[in-house]
Image (tube, rainbow, N blue to C red):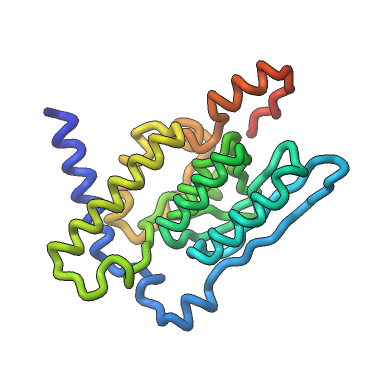
Amino acid sequence: MRDFFRSVRFGAAWLMGLALLSPLAAQSPADQQAAEGTVNIYNLDREAHVGGVEIHGLISKAVASQAMQLIRTIRPDVDDLKVLLSSPGGDVLAAMELGEEIRKQWAWTTVDENGECFGACVLVLAAGVRRIPTPESVGLQRMNFDQKEFVASLPSDKAKQKYTGVAKRVETYLARMGMPKKLFQEMSAQQSSAKVRLLDAAKLKSLGLDGIDPAYEQWLRENNIQQPPPSN
């Protein structure tokens, strides 16, 4: 019963936050397009079997699609495929779709000292089989979604049902990525605030955002592959 009331409380926080228009949602279509992120291949050396994909700016459906295409393209030539993130957030559903492909391809995710990873970007970070974020560069923030898809021409009760469905999909996604329940709970609580909550090194580890996927770790051991050094 205690868990039930806790779930209701976090669900209410999520709905309250989603009911508020975010800065992205308030922008005109032209502004959103101008603010859209970019995707590039970086440090690709096919002879050394190293390389990755870097994502800068807002994560939209188009950005996620382009990133997935590049990941699939270079995957056969790269042993440890890295996805470098520097994003203030973006579309929740697009971020989860990208995250599914990252996990499928057993790619790493990383945020360096010059980058940031807020809001929906955290969903992408969580997908890496090896997650290497820089402390204080990752932040929980009220997350955005495609307003036109979810609330256009919908009465308030139908819109709330859509919001509830989004929250459930995020919870299920994070569980599938092996993240602790605490991450979804803290993300839900942040939906009622417009501020970014930066995460220090200890918090990143406790929320599962700095670490390695157990299945990937086991594969490394079985193949006698040396594990990467732990992040600071």
Instruction: Please provide percent x and percent y for residue 126.
Output: 49, 41
214 horizontally vs 42: left or right: left
Q: In this view, does 74 lie above or below 172?
A: below
Question: Can you tell which quarter of the image residue 225 is in?
Answer: top right
Residue at the (40%, 78%) spot, across then down: 27
Numbered disc total: 0
Instruction: Please provide percent x and percent y for residue 184.
Output: 34, 41
Question: Can you tell which quarter of the image residue 174 is in?
Answer: top left
Residue at the (47%, 52%) spot, across then down: 97
Instruction: Please provide percent x and percent y for residue 192.
Output: 27, 56
Of residue 66 and residue 59, the one placed in the foreground of this image is 66
- Picture quarter with the N terminus: top left
Q: Is residue 182 above or below residue 164?
A: above
Of residue 197 and residue 161, the one placed in the foreground of this image is 161
Residue at the (59%, 27%) spot, across then down: 216
Residue with the most extreme right position: 47
- Picture quarter with the C terminus: top right
Residue at the (71%, 19%) spot, across then down: 223
Q: In this view, does 206 lie above or below 161?
A: above
